[in-house]
């Protein structure tokens, strides 16, 4: 299991109400998981927990057999740098960096990701170009452009290339397609799948667009597994 | 290290505002170090208004008063030195040279100084610089006059022009020595010292123009023409002060004691350097005010940077969430802003210094000729280094404020992108 959540309780503040209460959630390595749920149901919060930015108030969140709440904040930051790729809903790119430099970012913070990228290509830039090529961004002219001049769809694909750089074990995407039109959504997801399958990366994909559900191996509905509303802890 | 490369690229992206910050810091550094440099040089140059002279001898009075009238031509002597006393001092075995100074007359607001040719040999200012006659020559004839640069410039005199000396400090018709006009024979180069505002004539000439005067007024019925005066004995009875050079500086205090204990007349001998710095203490308050103002300019410059950094933070919260998503720690975010503040401060300081040296190079000849202050283009003094490192430290401290704020924000925001 790459992800193993047990008896998770989460509150943003010690005195606020519980946002997440998940008895159990397991994700196998290489799985492509679709997470859905209404707005405010705690999807982004769950992803923050998986990425180790926040920690469980109770229970455990294991990623790659590592209980994240046992790590210090610096160790969790390292853990994220080494093992997790993250795609935001939009505006993923750092405006003052070129396309290539944006893709290379994870390698600046993780020696492990740099090493894994170099294992696949003779240098980091070649690997970045290869990934961009796989995501239908192989035009060299594009790589030189200021990232702010890219279309939203192109920006999301650059973000995907960055998240995949150095083959992280876990790829987390928080509504990455909500700013794309329907056709683009599907092709974007298929490109992600191809890349993830090739290196065996596990994909956690959040969206409230149920039409995408059919493309994934499995769907988790937060409204169902999150018991905080009823106050009961499901089995 | 990666984070500093990012900080650099981020700065390049905002190069226009960054440049403005650098310029404002640079200008404030230029001002601060420049004021400090000018202050030191002005003080040095002031202390060297008269150099090479070991003692100034005059009638008994306080050192500042003696200095004021003998060197700065401000105020009047309470008493004179008799010619005999002057001769005795000149004959002292440890005395190398003496220059007599006789004051009391003026020409259109400029003081007239009676002296000997030795004045041009021994007068030194600004670290051993001698007087230079740019036009003409020293006085040789009885009625020759050598003008200071400012006198010549302000009154538009050239060599060979006639001038009339007046009795006392005010130039009024009835007190003019118009029966014995002088001729300009030389004009001195600008020194930035009171010499520029002085009319120099021979000691005998002072005697000659007063030969038919008594207690400040012409003797009624007595008139000695300029030509008649030439034939008379023009050895003065008294002089106002004397500049004294010694054979060895070690002897200074012995000769000073000799003068102060001179039995026939109450005299004072002062060390010009000591008296000059005593005088500087009095007028040096303004320079401190100047330094304080330039310190405030630096503070304003740094506040400009603080404002720029704090306003940029809100726009950069997304950037910070992205960085955290790729594994940056909140500490990295701190370093990102701190690196920027530090870089801006350092660059500002370097640019400011470069600008200062450029200005010094360009301004040195002008300042020297206009004000007689010679500003050395030397490396930074230890005091200037202290000032500079205080600026840089202040820059880092100021940078700490937005850096800490960014740190707190990135801890609180995590991966959620707030704008
Ligand atoms: N940083 C935070 N501090 C405090 N409360 C927060 C924070 N982030 C989210 N919340 C709260 O946690 C709850 C879950 O929010 P979350 O963002 O996880 O929902 P979501 O399912 O991602 O919604 P959406 O589909 O709109 O993105 C909400 O009630 C939200 O107000
Ligand atoms: Mg969300």
Image (tube, rainbow, N blue to C red):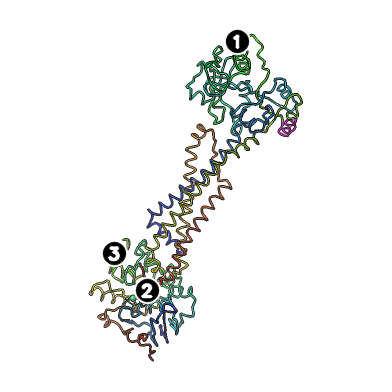
**Residue A201 % position (x, y):** 37, 79
Comparing A27 with B182, the one in front is B182
Residue span colored magenta: B248-257
Q: Residue furthest bottom?
A: A235
Question: What's the residue at 65%, 10% (across, down)?
Answer: B232
The quarter of the image that holds ligand 1 is bottom left
Residue A123 in the magenta stretch? The answer is no
Q: Which residue is mark 3?
A: A150
What's the distance in space between the residues labelled 3 and 1, CA to CA? 105 Å
Looking at the rendered structure, which numbered label has been put on residue A86? 2
Q: Nearer the viewer, mark 3 or mark 1?
A: 1
Q: Chain of mark 2?
A: A
Q: Magenta segment: does it hold B255?
A: yes
Q: Is residue B281 above or below residue A13?
A: above
Q: Are marks 1 and 2 in contact (CB under 8 Å)?
A: no
Question: Share a chain, discs 2 and 3?
Answer: yes
Q: Position of residue B322 (x, y in %)?
A: 38, 68
Picture quadrant where residue B15 is located: bottom left
Label 2 Cα crowd, 10 Å radius (few <14 / some 14-19 / many 20+): many
Secondary structure at numbered mark 2? strand
Q: Nearer the viewer, residue A192 or B104?
A: B104
Sooner in the amino-acid sequence: mark 2 or mark 3: 2
The answer to the question of whether label 3 and label 1 lie on touching residues, with beta carbons closer than 8 A, is no
Residue A126 drawn above or below residue B229: below
Identify the residue at image location x=55%, y=11%.
B179
**Which residue is the site of mark 1?**
B220
Q: CA distance from mark 1 to mark 2?
A: 111 Å
Does B334 appear above or below B380?
A: below
């Amino acid at each position: 299991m790459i992800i193993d959540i047990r008896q998770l309780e989460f509150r943003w503040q010690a005195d606020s109400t519980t946002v997440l209460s998940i008895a159990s959630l397991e994700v196998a390595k290489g799985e492509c998981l679709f997470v859905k749920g209404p707005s405010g149901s705690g999807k982004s919060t769950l992803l923050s927990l998986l990425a180790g930015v926040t920690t469980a108030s109770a229970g455990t969140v294991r990623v790659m057999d590592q209980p994240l709440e046992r790590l210090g904040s610096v160790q969790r930051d390292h853990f994220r740098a080494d093992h997790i790729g993250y795609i935001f809903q939009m505006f993923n790119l750092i405006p003052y960096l070129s396309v290539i430099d944006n893709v290379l970012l994870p390698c600046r913070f993780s020696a492990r990701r740099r090493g894994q990228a170099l294992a696949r290509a003779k240098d980091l830039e070649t690997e970045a170009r290869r990934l961009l090529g796989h995501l239908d961004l192989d035009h060299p002219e594009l790589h030189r452009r200021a990232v702010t001049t890219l279309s939203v769809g192109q920006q999301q694909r650059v973000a995907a290339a960055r998240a995949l750089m150095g083959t992280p074990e876990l790829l987390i995407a928080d509504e990455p397609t909500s700013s794309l039109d329907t056709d683009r959504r599907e092709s974007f997801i298929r490109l992600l799948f191809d890349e993830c399958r090739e290196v065996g990366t596990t994909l956690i994909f959040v969206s409230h667009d149920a039409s995408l559900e059919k493309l994934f191996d499995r769907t988790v509905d937060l409204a169902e597994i999150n018991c905080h509303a009823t106050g009961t802890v499901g089995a | 290290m990666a984070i500093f490369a990012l900080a650099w690229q981020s700065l390049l992206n905002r190069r226009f505002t960054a440049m403005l910050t650098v310029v404002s810091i640079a200008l404030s550094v230029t001002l601060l170090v420049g004021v400090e440099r000018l202050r030191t040089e002005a003080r040095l140059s002031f202390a060297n208004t008269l150099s090479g002279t070991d003692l100034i001898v005059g009638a008994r009075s306080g050192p500042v008063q003696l200095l004021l009238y003998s060197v700065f031509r401000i105020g009047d002597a309470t008493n004179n030195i008799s010619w005999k006393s002057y001769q005795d001092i000149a004959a002292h075995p440890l005395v190398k040279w003496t220059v007599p100074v006789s004051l009391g007359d003026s020409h259109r607001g400029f003081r007239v100084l009676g002296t000997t040719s030795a004045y041009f040999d021994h007068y030194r200012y600004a670290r051993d610089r001698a007087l230079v006659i740019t036009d003409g020559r020293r006085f040789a004839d009885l009625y020759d006059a050598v003008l200071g640069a400012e006198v010549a410039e302000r009154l538009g005199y050239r060599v060979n022009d006639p001038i009339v000396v007046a009795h006392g400090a005010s130039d009024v018709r009835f007190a003019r020595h118009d029966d014995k006009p002088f001729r300009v024979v030389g004009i001195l180069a600008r020194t930035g010292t009171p010499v520029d505002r002085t009319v120099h004539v021979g000691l005998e000439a002072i005697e000659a123009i007063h030969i038919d005067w008594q207690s400040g007024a012409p003797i009624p019925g007595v008139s000695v023409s300029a030509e008649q005066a030439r034939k008379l004995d023009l050895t003065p009875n008294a002089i106002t002060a004397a500049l004294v050079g010694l054979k060895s500086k070690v002897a200074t205090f012995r000769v000073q004691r000799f003068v102060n204990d001179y039995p026939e007349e109450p005299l004072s001998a002062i060390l010009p350097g000591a008296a000059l710095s005593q005088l500087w203490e009095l007028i040096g308050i303004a320079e401190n005010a100047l330094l304080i103002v330039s310190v405030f300019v630096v503070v304003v410059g740094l506040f400009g940077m603080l404002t720029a950094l704090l306003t940029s933070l809100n726009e950069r919260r997304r950037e910070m969430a992205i960085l955290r998503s790729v594994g940056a720690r909140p500490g990295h975010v701190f370093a990102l802003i701190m690196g920027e503040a530090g870089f801006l401060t350092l660059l500002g300081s370097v640019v400011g210094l470069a600008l200062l040296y450029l200005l010094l190079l360009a301004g040195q000849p002008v300042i020297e000729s206009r004000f007689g202050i010679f500003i050395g283009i030397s490396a930074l003094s230890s005091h200037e280094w202290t000032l500079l490192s205080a600026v840089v430290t202040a820059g880092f401290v100021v940078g700490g404020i937005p850096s800490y704020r960014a740190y707190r924000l990135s801890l609180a925001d995590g991966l959620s992108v707030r704008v």
